[in-house]
Amino acid sequence: MTIYGSRDLAAAFRTVRGNTIQIANDIPEDQYGFRATPDTRSVAEELAHIATATLWVAQAHEVDRTTFISFEDFGRYMTRIAEVAQTLASKTDIINALTKNGEEFAAFLERMSDDQLAEQVKFPPPIQPPVKSRFEMLLGTKEHEIHHRAKLMVIQRLLGIVPHLTRAREQRQPAAAKG
């Protein structure tokens, strides 16, 4: 039997956040205003969203210990993180927030007990499923970041930047081909 607990979740989140920070560093600050299309977030907005997205999750699961999230609750959480995201004005601000908020979130994940991870959180209709474990919701935070990071990797390509994970794979290929 394999048990994936809070320390594993924290370690996996740190890996994801480290890759996001690398992308934030690889994109020049003069490209932080770039938008793939007019109706999408800019690089800076996307990164600021990622940097602040963990704040509501920690608030809901650690501070509030909520067992029910209404649409109104979610709206309040989203308003708060949008306000914080708007304060991140420069590449340095964004990278600092990615680093600080990411480590605080990983530390929060490490503090979660198995019993806390198993607790159930309910949602109003029409949300499906109407109940999720805290573990599933916290895992979803990592998945959310990967989703947004994938968009940033496409943007990197549009800007002529080869994403660092691709560069690393390309560097390993000749060695692997030699045996």
Image (cartoon, grey):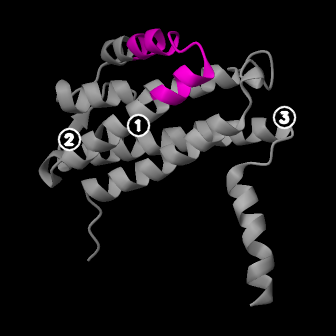
Q: Judging from the image, what secondary structure is the residue with disc 2 in? A: strand
- Residue 66 visible here: no
> How would you classify the magenta stretch by its main secondary structure?
helix
Near-viewer residue (13 or 57):
13
SS label for mark 1: helix
92 left or right of 11? right
Separation (CA) of disc 3 from disc 1: 26 Å
Q: Which residue is mark 3?
A: 159
Instruction: Judge the density around disc 3: few (<14), some (14-19), many (≥20) Cα neighbours within 10 Å.
Output: some
Distance Cα–Cα, label 1 vs label 2: 24 Å
Measured in 3D between alpha carbons, the distance from the residue under mark 3 to the one under mark 2, in whole angstroms, is 43 Å
Extent of the magenta region: 78-97
Q: Which residue is mark 1?
A: 102
Query: Mark 3 or mark 2, which is nearer to you?
Result: 3
Q: Amino acid at mark 1?
A: Gly
Q: Is residue 178 visible to us here?
A: yes
The quarter of the picture where residue 172 lies is bottom right
Query: Closest to the observer: 12 or 123?
Result: 12
